[in-house]
Image (spheres, rainbow, N blue to C red):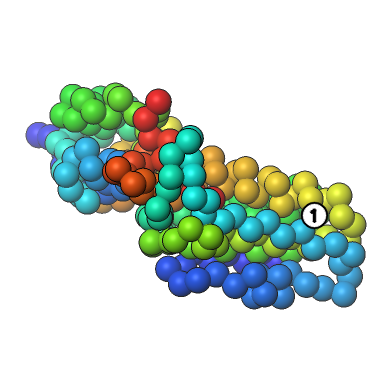
């Protein structure tokens, strides 16, 4: 049984996915790395970016962190504030 | 004291300055980032800043607090604008106060450098012949 996660998209990530929020179906107890892999499989254009990070509950997440149902997730493309 | 603001309204240099002013401080360092009319040889018409507000505010607070404790500052204030900005508009203001000037200069520089690396804010630059997200592609 796959686990559904909705993910917020900002900046160029929203242009790539065409939506402010996407839903990905991942294996149970997935890691951040699984999310990145699935994202690249569905939207290969993410591979063309300088980099992209994943935020979990409004903080940068490491690839080895486990995603819990209900986590707030976001794709963070290269930032350019200031 | 550290204070942050992420706002769609015009930023005030006076407000940022006043929030760090203190009789114990001998120096206040201000950095003001403004919108320039050119980038990489092309004319820029205007910009749009988008943010992931709740996370941006947390990162701004973390950066301000870290600079304050690492440099022994009295106060740090970090204000960033969002939405559409015209040439010459203020995008960011950083005010830092300390007993002596060296810490204020170093702390102020650290805040803008860390902001540019970590705070989830994205700049879309509009040129005469199109637009693009700054720094997203190689």
Query: What chain letter is assigned to the residue under label 1?
Result: B
- Near mark 1 (Cα within 10 A), the count class, few <14, some 14-19 or many ≥20, is many
Work out whether A9 lies above or below A35. below
Residue A81: where, in percent of width, then height? 49, 49
Which quadrant is home to the N terminus of chain B? bottom right
Which quadrant is home to the C terminus of chain B? top left
Left or right of residue A57: residue B97: right
Q: Quadrant of residue A22?
A: top left
Left or right of residue B132: residue B71: right
The answer to whether residue A79 is visible is no
Residue A58: where, in percent of width, then height? 41, 51
Could you tell me which residue is drawn at 16 percent across and 44 percent down? A18
Q: Quadrant of residue A67?
A: top left
Task: Give the residue at mark 1.
Answer: B104
Question: How many numbered marks are there?
Answer: 1
- Describe the element under mark 1 as helix, strand or loop: helix
Work out whether A6 lies above or below A36. below
Residue B32: where, in percent of width, then height? 64, 58
């Amino acid at each position: 049984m796959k686990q559904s996660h909705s993910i917020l998209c900002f900046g160029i990530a929203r242009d790539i996915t065409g939506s402010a929020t996407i839903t990905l179906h991942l294996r149970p107890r997935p890691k951040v790395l699984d999310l990145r892999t699935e994202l690249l499989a569905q939207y290969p254009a993410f591979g063309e970016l300088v980099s992209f990070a994943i935020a979990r509950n409004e903080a940068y997440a490491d690839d080895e962190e486990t995603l819990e149902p209900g986590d707030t997730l976001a794709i963070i493309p290269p930032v350019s504030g200031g | 004291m550290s204070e942050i603001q992420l706002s769609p309204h015009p930023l005030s240099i006076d407000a940022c300055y006043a929030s760090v002013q203190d009789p114990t401080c001998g120096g206040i360092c201000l950095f003001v980032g403004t919108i320039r009319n050119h980038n990489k040889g092309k004319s820029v018409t205007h910009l749009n800043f988008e943010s992931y507000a709740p996370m941006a505010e947390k990162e701004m607070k973390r950066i301000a607090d870290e600079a304050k404790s690492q440099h022994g500052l009295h106060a740090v204030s970090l204000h960033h604008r969002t939405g559409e900005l015209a040439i010459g508009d203020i995008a960011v203001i950083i005010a830092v106060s300390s007993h002596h000037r060296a810490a204020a200069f170093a702390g102020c520089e650290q805040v803008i450098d860390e902001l540019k690396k970590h705070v989830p804010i994205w700049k879309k630059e509009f040129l005469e012949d199109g637009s693009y997200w700054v720094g997203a592609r190689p």
